[in-house]
Image (cartoon, helix red, strand yellow):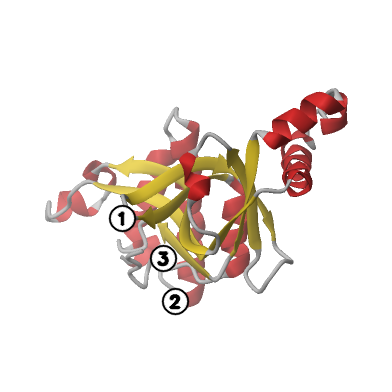
Amino acid sequence: MYQPPSFREPRTEVMHDLIEAFPLATLVTAGADGPFATHLPVVLDRAAGPLGTLRGHVARANPHHRLATAAPALVLFRGPDAYVSPSLYPSKADHGRVVPTWNYIAVHAYGPLAFVDDPAFVLGVVEALTRRFEGGRAQPWAVDDAPREYVDALARAVVGVELPIARLEGKWKMSQNRDARDAAGVAEGLAGSTDAVEREVARIVAERLAARGAATGEGPERS
């Protein structure tokens, strides 16, 4: 992934937080017929390996699992994103040399991919996914709520996915390439949006701007 230094996020724990907050992944591998992608929710085991391990499952009918075990793979995660209008930059009034852009967050995880054709492994993944996404509900559903023969039949219809993460890349493109005054304009402008995702982008832009100011002493009033 292209990572200008101002957008690069090197902290593993920050990238892990993003993966857990946005767990619908895009799994990409390359084969004889070119790239193949599957969208699937995953759980992250932070303690399994230096950078953690991703686990999920795909339908047995999905041809993706016929790829060779331990094939190199890329798993993509996306966080909040928003269009940024040049009208949000105060510098537009100064010189007009501004253009539209897009703010976004992305994490790329790389590693050897294994498809695990083992009902016990699959059941463990399903239970982990269920605990992860049902845990906050007032009346959480559990795998044991379904008839055992039904669960066993479904487990035979899917194949497990496991990827020990060998490399992580994080990109937080949140107006860090703009001066503090323009970045503050983006945060203020998006904060007034009726769109919740745009307001979240505004919060992250402001957070990154504050961190920049703490590190460099740069602030909107100095730009």
Find residue 22 and report its horizontal and vertical position in percent: 57, 45
Would you place residue 51 above or below residue 30 in this image?
Answer: below
Q: Amino acid at mark 3?
A: Gly
Residue at disc 2, secondary structure: helix
Find residue 177 and report its horizontal and vertical position in percent: 31, 64
Q: Quadrant of the N terminus?
A: bottom left
Q: Quadrant of the C terminus?
A: bottom left
Residue at 32% across, 41% down:
83
Crowd around label 1: few <14 · some 14–19 · many ≥20 (10 Å): many
Query: What's the mark number on residue 219?
Result: 3
Query: What's the mark number on residue 116?
Result: none
The one of 36 and 103 positioned closer to us in this rendering: 36
Q: Is residue 144 left or right of residue 24?
A: right
Would you place residue 190 above or below residue 150 in this image?
Answer: below
Q: Amino acid at mark 1?
A: Asp
Q: Amino acid at mark 2?
A: Thr
Are discs 2 and 1 less than 8 Å apart at CB? no
Q: Earlier in the sequence, mark 1 or mark 3?
A: 1
Q: Is residue 107 left or right of residue 223?
A: right
Find residue 218 and report its horizontal and vertical position in percent: 40, 70
Marks 1/3: CA–CA distance: 11 Å
Residue at 42% across, 61% down:
171
* Circle 2 residue: 216
Mark toward the viewer: 2 or 3: 2
Query: What's the mark number on residue 182?
Result: 1
Marks 2/3: CA–CA distance: 9 Å
Would you place residue 65 above or below residue 107 in this image?
Answer: above
